[in-house]
Image: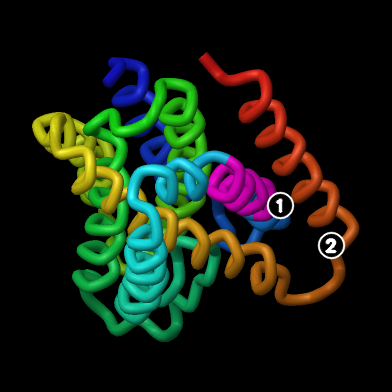
Amino acid sequence: MQFWWLFMLFFFPFIGGVIGLLVQSEKTRQLKLFLAFSGAFLISITILNLIPEVYETLGHKAGYYILGGFFLQIVLDFFTKGIEHGHLHIHDLKKGFPYSVFIALSLHAFIEGLSLGGGAFSEEIQNNMVFAIGLHELPAAFALAVVLKSVFSKTNINYLYIAIYAVMVPSGILIGSSLTGYEEVLTGLIGLVIGVFLHISTTILFENNESHTYGRYKLVAIAIGLGVALLAVNFHIH
């Protein structure tokens, strides 16, 4: 575990949440394009880096963990309303603090950090995981901030909840680091996260664009995400 992992995985969701609190509209082309970029990067890193490593360690059992993670994300989506992959349905939320949304999102982030903390894979692959998680958590925090703005008028409270959410992934990393030595458990957790990544990335790529107005730009964003992932895999991010 490196200190910059903790910093990056706090900074990405925190800055995403702050941007979400500051902008006036939740439906921006920029958010959709960033989601397309992050979705392409996420699925590419998952297929090229994470899946081969999990199968090498766990064999055929890896499939059960991956499938479990995929359906776990479906359950979490029931509570989060899909805001972690760009679905914002503020009008469907009842007045009052969205406890189910915040808790489910926080659990999702904590599990991602937990899988990273034990150092089950090489440093290069873990570095790629850090960027993949960070790029995914930024728009998730943005969406959470938009939901919080619809509930609370006091800005300070919103910043507090964003800060709490931003701590979830680093907290998971710190706790996961205590599991060093339990390689199969840690790899199983990464299998769960792979399933989560597959669900989120495919949902972003196939459902994010509500119309075809920005289809050309979305395609470019996806191509850039794929290209960055290929560079990360083949030349390694240190």
Which residue lies at the image location 22% right of the left edge and 32% below the top edge? Answer: 118
Label 1 and label 2: CA atoms lie apart by 9 Å
Query: How many C-alpha atoms fall within 10 Å of the one at disc 2: few (<14), some, or many (≥20)?
Result: few
The residue pinned by badge 2 equals: 214
Judge left or right: residue 9 versus residue 179.
right
Residue 21 in view, yes or no: no
* Residue 172 falls left or right of residue 5: left
Amino acid residing under circle 2: Tyr
- Residue nearest the viewer, comparing 224 with 214: 224
190 in magenta: no
Q: Is residue 120 above or below residue 22?
A: above
Task: Please give the name of the residue rendered at 45% of the width and 36% of the height, measured from the top-left corner.
Answer: 129
User: Residue placed at 63% from the left, 27% from the top?
Assistant: 232
The residue lying toward the viewer, choosing from 8 and 184, is 184
- Sequence-first disc among 1 and 2: 1
Magenta includes 47? yes
The residue nearer to you, when weighing 85 against 163, is 85
Are the residues tagged 1 and 2 within 8 Å (C-beta)? yes
The residue under label 1 is 33
Q: Quadrant of residue 115?
A: top left
Q: Position of residue 21 (x, y in %)?
A: 43, 49
Q: Is residue 189 above or below residue 95?
A: above
The number of numbered discs placed on residues in the rendered structure image is 2
Q: Determine the residue positioned at 52% across, 61% down.
A: 198
Residue flagged by tag 1: what amino acid is it? Leu
Residue 99, percent from left and from top: 19, 70
Residue segment shown in magenta: 36-48
Q: Main secondary structure of the magenta part?
A: helix
Relative image position of residue 67 (x, y in whole percent): 40, 70
